[in-house]
């Protein structure tokens, strides 16, 4: 019997999984580079998901997925992985995973806006207020007074901030596209299909996203004439270890469980719980990197999380 809080528990597991992903990806992106790491992640994710689908459903690929399901889930992979994760991992290179994950709190509001535009979902006045609270929390964390006039300035590089914003937008819009794709997928599964195929639908959806992500990153590396950098990455054993851990806790486990969470819990509650990563990462990141945590940064992060919660729970 499935617990009445099964979806919420899964969402908390996702937040923990993404915290581990961010810490591992921080190291891997510095050692391997953003594009090579992302291509390697897509390949490893593809392999992990193929094995799991083969064991559970008897086929190493998504069964019964319609053309519409492939289209929307592939588009989600291009937006969420190729654009969103490219921006996210570059933000890690610029200022580390703790601030990178702070910008990921933009994902739930961006998902709300995308749902409003693409699915006709409601956007009430309190949603806009909640978004303002979220942005205020981020601003408190990344702005500082400096100079003779004590003007507000960015204490983080603008390049990293732009990458962070791009990561949040890509993640939020990608989630809505995934929802559309999974709805088409569910409609294409015949009633007589085994329940194992229905239960594995989030993992099958992630498989399709990984295929699209692989194609996108491969083309980017080819256009930038950097495919040789992928071969060099395989010689970095420590980098490959962290890339494997990043893949397991990210595209394989975390992303798949996030799609499962929104199936068993209200999307707002699940998204809010999954967005706890910026809070969960503060202490381990500070310990690993031997950094001091300012009260202002903690307050800013907590305000950001309140904004995310208000966006969905009011």
Image: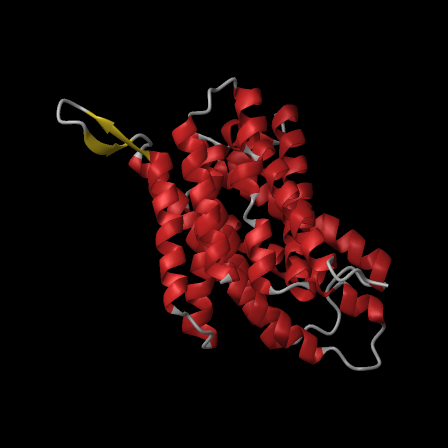
| In-front residue for pair 90/120 | 120
| In-front residue for pair 121/235 | 121
The extreme top residue here reads 290
The extreme front residue here reads 314
Q: Quadrant of residue 1?
A: bottom right
Vertical side of 50 occupied by 227: above or below? above
The answer to whether one can see residue 94 in this image is no
The answer to whether one can see residue 59 in this image is yes
Q: Is residue 140 left or right of residue 307?
A: left
> x, y percentage for residue 111?
47, 61
> x, y percentage for residue 96?
46, 31
Say which residue appears at 33% left-offset and 32% top-offset: 156
The extreme left residue here reads 149
| In-front residue for pair 277/303 | 303
Q: Is residue 12 left or right of residue 32?
A: right
Q: Is residue 142 left or right of residue 64?
A: left
Vertical side of 150 occupied by 310: above or below? below
């Amino acid at each position: 019997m499935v617990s009445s809080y099964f979806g919420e528990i899964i969402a908390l597991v996702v937040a923990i999984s993404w915290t581990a992903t961010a810490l591992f990806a921080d190291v891997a992106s510095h050692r391997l580079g953003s594009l090579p790491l992302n291509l390697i992640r897509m390949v490893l994710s593809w392999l992990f998901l193929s094995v799991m689908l083969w064991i559970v459903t008897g086929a190493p690929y998504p069964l019964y997925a319609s053309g519409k399901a492939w289209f929307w889930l592939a588009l989600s992979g291009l937006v969420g992985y190729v654009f969103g994760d490219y921006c996210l991992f570059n933000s890690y290179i610029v200022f580390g995973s703790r601030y990178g994950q702070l910008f990921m709190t933009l994902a739930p509001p961006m998902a709300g806006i995308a749902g409003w535009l693409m699915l006709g979902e409601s956007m009430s006045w309190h949603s806009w207020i909640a978004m303002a609270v979220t942005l205020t929390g981020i601003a408190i964390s990344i702005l500082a007074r400096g100079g003779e006039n004590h003007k507000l300035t960015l204490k983080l590089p603008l390049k990293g901030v732009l990458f962070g914003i791009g990561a949040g937008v890509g993640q939020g819009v990608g989630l809505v596209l995934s929802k559309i794709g999974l709805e088409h997928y569910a409609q294409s599964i015949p009633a007589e299909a085994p329940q194992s195929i229905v239960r594995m639908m989030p993992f099958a959806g992630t498989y399709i996203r990984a295929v699209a992500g692989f194609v996108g990153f491969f083309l980017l590396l080819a256009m930038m004439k950097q495919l040789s950098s992928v071969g060099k990455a395989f010689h970095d054993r420590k980098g490959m270890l962290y890339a494997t851990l990043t893949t397991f806790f990210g595209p394989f486990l975390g992303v798949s469980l996030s799609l499962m969470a929104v199936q068993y819990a209200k999307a707002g509650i699940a998204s809010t719980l999954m967005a706890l990563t910026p809070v969960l990462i503060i202490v381990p990141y500070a310990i690993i990197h031997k950094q001091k945590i300012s009260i202002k940064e903690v307050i800013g992060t907590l305000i950001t999380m309140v904004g995310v919660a208000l966006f969905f729970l009011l």
